[in-house]
Amino acid sequence: WSSKDFPWTKQLEVNNKKVFGNHSFRPNQREIINATMSGCDVFVLMPTGGGKSLTYQLPALICPGITLVISPLVSLIQDQIMHLLQANISAAYLSANMEWTEQQEIFRELNSEYCNYKLLYVTPEKIAKSDVLLRNLESLHARELLARIVIDEAHCVSQWGHDFRPDYQGLGILKQKFPNTPVLALTATATASVKEDVVQALGLVNCIIFRQSFNRPNLRYSVLPKTKKCLEDVDKFIRENHFDECGIIYCLSRMDCEKVAEKLQEFGHKCAFYHGNMDPAQRAFVQKQWSKDEINIICATVAFGMGINKPDVRFVIHHSLPKSIEGYHQECGRAGRDGLRSSCILYYSYSDYIRVKHMISQGAIEQSSMTYGYSRSNMTNSGRILETNTENLLRMLAHFGEKFDSSTCQKTCDNCLKNTSFIEKDVTEIAKQLVELVKLTGQKVSSSHILEVYRGSLSQLVKKHRHDTLSLHSAGKHLAKGEASRVLHHLVVEDFLVEEVKKSDFYGSVSSILKVNDPKVRNLLLGGQRIILRFPSSIKASKLAKFEF
Ligand code: ADP
């Protein structure tokens, strides 16, 4: 599909420059355009910022007729229409909350002999609910004016995705009604099973698949331990690396957004918060301020993001563990869309891991569509991926079904950049002792208490419970700081131990006690199962805590 010998090649070159102001095509753009203009159904997996819009806007400009674009968010649609009109490309949109007279005007144009629009954007709800729209599409089709159907954010079709929208599932009707009209499905986030699901639900035929590497060389990824001084670190990081530049800080809860924003304001940053509890006008105001660089930093829940088209976002910081790998990927993808170097930092703490896990089990995580279909295994996966702080990028790519060729590694994660090497250590005996200690203390105490006893603490609480008299008291005192907790947390992430939440406070903090998962532990204690963990070898043992998960 990369050939420059298609009948439309010259027109593509000219219009790409003249109308869109681009000097060349980005990876896969030409190939996708050639495939869709040849009449094939096409599925595109391309990272955010890769340039998906051009792959249908340029054909729309060149082909006779109208391109129907289904897109999930009105704000996203409005942004696209604004850009198209600026480039003198005639485009319109229909959404359920538009005035009826306004809608009628658009239908009138669609019915005119030579419909002037090159693109018509609609929300999936509109396709599901509007018979008038379907009749208009049938009429366009009958007059051979329906050039192409584009499904943007196509992963929303799949229940396996993290952003399922019921109205997207009904979009299969389009292929049934217009079997010969090429469909172009676009997404920045789809695993192999989501892709299969989307292709099937939309009824795509002999579909050509384009998947593009998610390894974005201009993004530098770091995973850092989240300490009490996390926000001081963030302040320092921004001052030293991105002073007066623009960024997003993703927080877990609305309360966190407000607290983080307040603290950064105290540090002197131009900063605001954004979450689902604000009224829409307030949210739009903050977004506008940020888009126009009146404020630099936005502290937001995942409610902020889809449809953000700001090319110069220099940093995306996750103040807490993201809710899913797909979500993490998409959120990071908002950085550096202009191709310039940008930073993605994730602050990881074991307590956030427990907190998110608890929130999910309670159904307390915002039920925005972003978390729909989120499963416990997703969560565990993100814990696992971060667990070793190594090859996180590599594993993330694997999650998206990419085979990673290490010779082409762009070395953009911290481990590569710092040349970190790792040693493997058999920690089975430590693991067994910790499990034993949980049993000896009656499965009634927290993980931090277990660690205190194991390290030999003589605190009041330890003495009160007479845990200083246990045989395993101080059994782990020779270990490097952080090593025992790393093993303990691994036991929880891998389900040998279970954190049972006793209470969670207003701020979402949780207090919990450790219990033993007997069936799983049996194999460890009796069956000869070994536990091997990887530790960064260049780091002195005393600094292991930095990598503590
Ligand atoms: P996506 O939809 O994949 O997230 P967009 O279509 O919004 O990405 O494109 C991201 C940015 O890249 C936009 O600012 C767009 O103008 C720019 N862009 C797209 N294609 C090219 C190109 N061939 N050359 C230069 N810039 C491009």
Image (cartoon, rainbow, N blue to C red):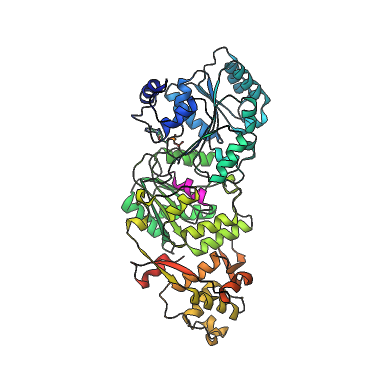
From the viewer's side, name the closer residue of 151 and 27.
Answer: 27
Can residue 386 be seen here? yes
Q: Residue 405 in the image: x percent, y percent?
A: 39, 49
Name the outermost residue toward the bottom: 469
Residue 371, compared with residue 115, is above or below; it is: below
Name the outermost residue toward the top: 113
Toward which corner of the image does residue 512 lie, by quadrant?
bottom right
From the viewer's side, name the closer residue of 479 and 275.
Answer: 479
Residue 469, compared with residue 412, is above or below; it is: below
Q: Residue 284 in the image: x percent, y percent?
A: 51, 39
**Which contiguous range is marked in magenta?**
323-335
Toward which corner of the image does residue 379 lie, by quadrant?
bottom right
Q: Is residue 243 magenta?
A: no
From the viewer's side, name the closer residue of 171 and 21.
Answer: 171
Magenta segment's dominant SS is helix
Is 482 positioned to the left or the right of 460 in the image?
A: left
Q: Residue 370 in the image: x percent, y percent?
A: 56, 46
Residue drawn at the location 40% of the way across and 66% of the way down: 546
